[in-house]
Amino acid sequence: MFYLGIKESVQDQSDKDNMEKVIREEMHHYLSLNMHLSELEGKIN
């Protein structure tokens, strides 16, 4: 959410494009962490 706010506040299109890259990378991290968490939960149960 933080990066979405920054993306909306910048004026330059190249800055918006850079923020979009950061957002996509953060989404990848989020999905990766959720996958690892699910794997760990499976090992605990």
Image (tube, grey):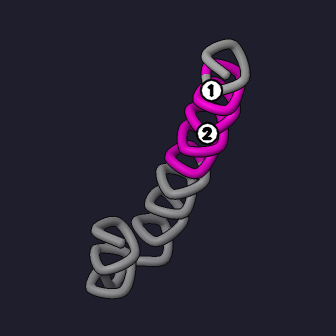
Within-10-Å neighbours for mark 2: few <14, some 14–19, many 20+ = few
Find residue 41 and name its label.
Answer: 1
Q: Secondary structure at mark 1?
A: helix
Query: Which of marks 1 and 2 precedes in the sequence?
Result: 2
Q: Residue at x 49, y 76 (%)?
A: 13
Measured in 3D between alpha carbons, the distance from the residue under mark 2 to the one under mark 1, in whole angstroms, is 10 Å
Q: Which quadrant is the C terminus positioned in?
A: top right
Question: CB under 8 Å between callouts 2 and 1?
Answer: no
Q: Can you say whether 2 is above or below 22 in the image? A: below
Q: Which one is in front, 34 or 23?
A: 34
Magenta residues (range): 25-40
Counting every numbered tag in the picture gives 2
- Depth order, front residue of 25/8: 25
User: Quarter of the image holding residue 38?
Assistant: top right
Residue 3 horizontal side relative to residue 18, left or right:
left
Above or below: residue 19 compared with residue 30:
below
Report the residue marked by disc 2.
34
Q: Position of residue 39 (x, y in %)?
A: 71, 22
Main secondary structure along the magenta-highlighted residues: helix
